[in-house]
Image (cartoon, rainbow, N blue to C red):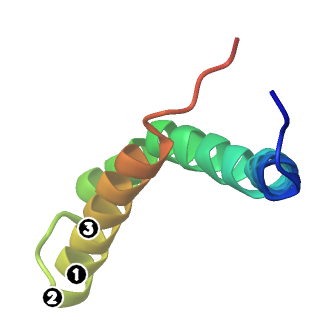
Amino acid sequence: MATRLTDLTTTASESESKSALGSVRATVVTPVTAAAFWAAIALPFLYLPLLFLTGLSSQSTATAFLALLGLNVVALLVGHPYYRG
């Protein structure tokens, strides 16, 4: 059976796009996921001084606490697929 030239170019372009996607994943996605994973681990340690030293008595402290909590949730979601194999 003869293979069409368009079939070969389609296959070549698909493999090039997969290669480019793998390159982007290795250089961008993996480090961002790793940073988010470790940020999700480290961020709760910032809650302790905020809560024990100042409490949530002022509006600015409560806002900072909620911002840290929201940032931690985002870091958990982004860093969830990180795996150190």
Q: Which residue is pictured at 14% across the width and 69% down the height?
A: 56
* Residue type pointed to by label 3: Phe
Could you tell me if the residues under marks 3 and 1 are in contact, i.e. CB atoms within 8 Å? Answer: yes
Q: Which mark is residue 65?
A: 3
Residue extending furthest toward the left: 57
Instruction: Tell me where residue 21 appears, x and y as whole percent.
Output: 75, 53
- Side of 13 where 71 appears, left or right: left
Query: Of 23 and 16, which appears nearest the observer?
Result: 16
Q: Which residue is pictured at 60% across the width and 22% down the height?
A: 83
Which residue position holds label 2?
59
Task: Report helix, strand or loop for mark 1.
Answer: helix
- Side of 78 where 65 appears, left or right: left
Circle 3 Cα neighbour tier, 10 Å, few/some/many (<14 / 14–19 / ≥20)? some
| Marks 3/2: CA–CA distance | 10 Å
Circle 2 Cα neighbour tier, 10 Å, few/some/many (<14 / 14–19 / ≥20)? few
Query: Of 29 and 42, which appears nearest the observer?
Result: 29
Could you tell me if the residues under marks 3 and 2 are in contact, i.e. CB atoms within 8 Å? Answer: no
Q: Which residue is pictured at 86% across the width and 48% down the height?
A: 8
- Side of 59 where 27 appears, left or right: right
